[in-house]
Structure formats: structure tokens, C-alpha cells
Amino acid sequence: MPEFSIYADYMRKVLGELLNWSHEKVDAMVADALSNSRFRTWFMHDPWSEEVAWLIMRDKIPERLDQLAGKPALRLARRLMHALDPSPGSFNIHLHHDVHYDWGAARDRIQQILNDYAKAA
């Protein structure tokens, strides 16, 4: 499916910019996801920024993941989604090609959310 290659490109750019992931690490994550029939079934049903939000939480606050459950986890994911893509309802799957996108500002917004979460916990 051509959408899978767009997804891989998106993830390479976004996770590289936000989490400093190598293309190899992203490609391994994408290959793992594509080998999961549940992922393939729901592919394109949810904004990709939602998946990125959960990956940010796993990468940046792994020690707190056990504490994150239910509505608090969903609220944090939603805030991270909006930090990445201020209009996730538009389902911007081409964010990785947006030459005007400010990756530094996105990193700052995400870090501020994580700092707020750390203070509140």
C-alpha cells in the first residue's frame, strides 16, 4: 500500500526531529507495526500524531508509564498531539513535508507539557 511508505516517511521525519531517532530505529518500529494485523486493520483511522504522542511518552518518561492509565494518559496524549499538530482534526499526514513547520517550537511545546506533567505528578 502506498500509504505505508507515506507513513514510514512521516515517522522518519517526525521521530527523527522530535526524538532524534535514527532511520534504522524508525524503520524497525514501522516494520514491527506493519507485522501486526491489528495495526494494519486500524491503519489510517487515527491521526498519526496520536501514535507519535504515545511514542514520546514511552521515550521521554518510561519510568512513569506504569502510572499512566485511563483518562490521565489520554489527556497527556491529547496534549502532546496538539503540541505536534495544533489542528489534529485536519489529519495532517503531510506534516513531514511542511517547509514552514517549526520543529524547534514543537520540541519546546512538547517539553513544556512534559515539564508540567512532572510537576503535577
Image: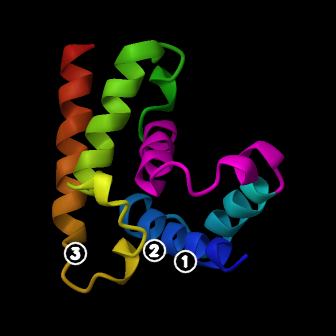
Q: Report which residue position mark 3 lands on.
A: 101
Which dot marks residue 9?
Answer: 1
Residue 72 percent location from the top left of the image:
35, 17
In percent of the image, x 42 and y 40: which residue is there?
60
Q: Which mark is residue 87?
A: none
**Earlier-in-chain disc, 2 versus 3:** 2
Snapshot quadrant of residue 120: top left
Q: Residue at x 38, y 16 (%)?
A: 71
- Residue drawn 25% across the image and 47% down it: 82
Residue extent of the magenta highlight? 35-59
Q: CA distance from mark 1 to mark 2?
A: 6 Å
Q: Residue at x 43, y 58 (%)?
A: 19
Residue 51 is covered by the magenta coloring:
yes
- For this rendering, which residue is in front, 92 or 73? 92
Q: Which residue is mark 2?
A: 13
Give residue 112's quadrant in the image.
Answer: top left
Give the answer, above or below, for where 72 lies relative to 116.
above
Mark 3 neighbour class, 10 Å CA radius: few under 14, some 14 to 19, many 20 or more: few
Looking at the picture, how far across and down is residue 86, in whole percent? Answer: 20, 54
What is the three-letter code of the residue carrying label 3?
Tyr
